Amino acid sequence: MVPLFGGIEAGGTKFVCAVGAGPDDLRAEVRFPTTSPAETIERALAFFREAQAQHGPLAALGIASFGPVDLDPRSPTFGSITSTPKPGWANADLAGPFRRAFGLPVGFDTDVNGAALGEWRWGAAQGLDTFLYLTIGTGIGGGGLAAGRRLHGLVHPEMGHIRLPHDTARDPFPGLCPFHGDCFEGLAAGPALEKRWGARAETFAPDHPAWALEAHYIALALHNYICTLSPQRIILGGGVMGQQQMFPLVRAGVRDLLNGYVQAPAVLERLDDYIVPPALGGRAGVLGAIALAGEAAEA
Amino acid sequence: MVPLFGGIEAGGTKFVCAVGAGPDDLRAEVRFPTTSPAETIERALAFFREAQAQHGPLAALGIASFGPVDLDPRSPTFGSITSTPKPGWANADLAGPFRRAFGLPVGFDTDVNGAALGEWRWGAAQGLDTFLYLTIGTGIGGGGLAAGRRLHGLVHPEMGHIRLPHDTARDPFPGLCPFHGDCFEGLAAGPALEKRWGARAETFAPDHPAWALEAHYIALALHNYICTLSPQRIILGGGVMGQQQMFPLVRAGVRDLLNGYVQAPAVLERLDDYIVPPALGGRAGVLGAIALAGEAAEA
C-alpha cells in the first residue's frame, strides 16, 4: 500500500491542504482563506482529521509556508513564522499544532523551497541537483536546491529582495518595498505593476509596455541568480508568469544580459529549456508540501 | 604518518605550489609567474617531482584554478580551463598532465571554491555549512559551500558579474567589463578603481572618496548574495580588502541596505563577525588547493 501524506501550502492569502501520494494520486483537497492563525490552523486540522477517517492514516505531514520562517531544527521556534507584517501571524507556531495533534513527523520549509522540491520530485527539475524555483505574483520569492539540498543557510533565501539596476529615466516609479524601496520585489511584484500603471495587471494587453519593463527586471534578477548560483534550470511560477508573452521576453532579456559570458549550451542555445514554467502548474505548492512530508517520513 | 598533499593555486598572474598537510605543516612552497601552459605546467611538475624526492610520496594533488573551468566529472574536458581570454590558456588541460605524470587523484575546482574549502577546513568558516568566499582584486570572484557542498551547478558561480544599481550621477564611470560594462567586477575590481580615478589604488589615502564608493558597490553585492544564498558568514579576501578602512565601510553599507529585513542576530547585531577577512590570509588559495587534494584522496 502506498503511504499517504498530508500537505499544506500555507499562503498569506489562502491555505491549500491535500492528502495523497503525488500528482496522480491526490485523494482530497481543500482551500480556504488565511484568517487568524487559530482559526486557519483549526480548519486545516479538521480537514486532516476527516481525511484520515476517510482515507486512512497519514505517514507524515508537510508544510510549505509563507515567511519568513524559522527553519533551524535546533531552534525553540522551529516551524514558526517569524517577523511577518501579516496581522496576528508574527511568531505564529505553524508546525507545532500539527505535530501535537497527530503525533506525525512534520516537514517544514518555505513555500518556494517546497514548490522546488515538488518540481524536483515530479516536475520540471527531475534529475537536477542545482536549480531555482521563483514565484512572481503578489510578492516575489525564490527557493531551490544546491548540490541536491534545499537552500537554507543563515535563515533562508529572500531572493525577491535583491537590488537591481533601476534606470529612473525609463522608469521613475520609486518601488514599493517597505524595507528597500526599489528592490526586485519593490519594482516587479504585482502590486508594483498596478501602482506604476494605475490599473490591474490582468487588464493590460500583451503588448502593453508594462510587460517589457517587467520582463527586463525579471531578466536582470535571473542574470544575478545565474551568476551567483549557476543553476541548471530556472522555473518561473506565479501570476505574472501566467501571461503568455512573458517567457519569450524574459529569455531574450537573459540572453542579452549574459552576452555570451557563461559558456554553457543551456544558456547559449537552449534557453527555452532553461527558463521554464512549473510542470506541476498551480499545484506545485501543495504537491511540494506533500514532497516535504515524504522527506520527513524518511528522515 | 600524516599523509602529504600537493596543492596548486593556479592564478592568471602567478602559480603557487606547495606540499604539506595543512597550515601548520607546509614542507615546501614555490611561486612563479604564469607564462604559457606548457612552460608553467612543466615548472609545477618539476616542483612536485623534486618535493616528492625530498619529502616522500604525495597522497593526492589539488588544483584551485582561475577560470572559467570545466568542473563536470563526466565531461571529456573535465579539469580544463575553458574560455579565458588569457593568451594560450583557452581549453588548456590543467588536471590531466598532473594525473598522468604522478598517477595520483587530482582534486580540481575554481580558485575561490578552493579558498572557501581551505577556510572551511582550517580558517574562518570552520563549522559552517553555508558561506561565501569572495576575492576582490584584479578581478572579482566568489565561491563557497551550500549545505556543506561546494557551489557548482551548471558551470560554477561567476559572482563578480552580477548587475548592481549604478547611480551614474554619483559615478559616471561606465565600467570595464568587456561582457557587461558596469557589472560588479566592471565597476569595482582593481582595474576599474585605477581607471576611474586615474591612479593606482594603493596610492589613495584611506579617506579618498574611491573607498566609500568601492565599499558601496561591495555592500550592494553582499546584500544580493545574502538575499540569494543566506550565507552564515561572508569571507572577503583580495587586494582591495587589504585596505584597513574597507571592512567597517562594507559592514555599515550592508547594515543600511538590508535595513533590518533579514531577522538574524548575525546580520542585525554581529556584522563584525559576519563579514570577515580570510583567517588563512594570503595562503587561503594554496591551502585551499591542499584541502582539495585531501578531498580527492578520500573520494
Image (cartoon, coloured by chain):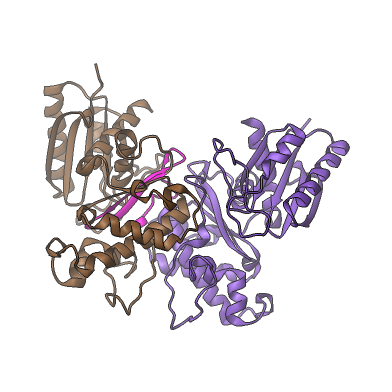
Chain colours: A brown, B purple
The C terminus of chain B lies in which quarter of the figure? top right
Residue nearer the viewer, A115 or B270: A115
Q: Is residue A135 magenta?
A: yes
Name the one closer to the observer, B9 or B76.
B76
In this picture, residue A214 sits left or right of residue B176: left
Where B28 falls versus B200 (above or below)?
above
Q: Would you place residue B205 above or below residue B65 in this image?
A: below
Residue at image position (63%, 36%) is: B295
Identify the magenta region. Answer: A131-160
Q: Position of residue A183 (x, y in %)?
A: 34, 66
Q: Which residue lies at the image location 67% right of the left edge and 41% below the top edge?
A: B95
Q: Is residue B242 left or right of residue A120?
A: right
Q: Which residue is pictured at 35% across the width and 39% down the height?
A: A125
Q: Is any part of residue A10 visible from this angle?
A: yes
As displayed, is residue A37 above or below residue B13? Answer: above
Q: Which quarter of the figure is the N terminus of chain B placed in?
A: top right
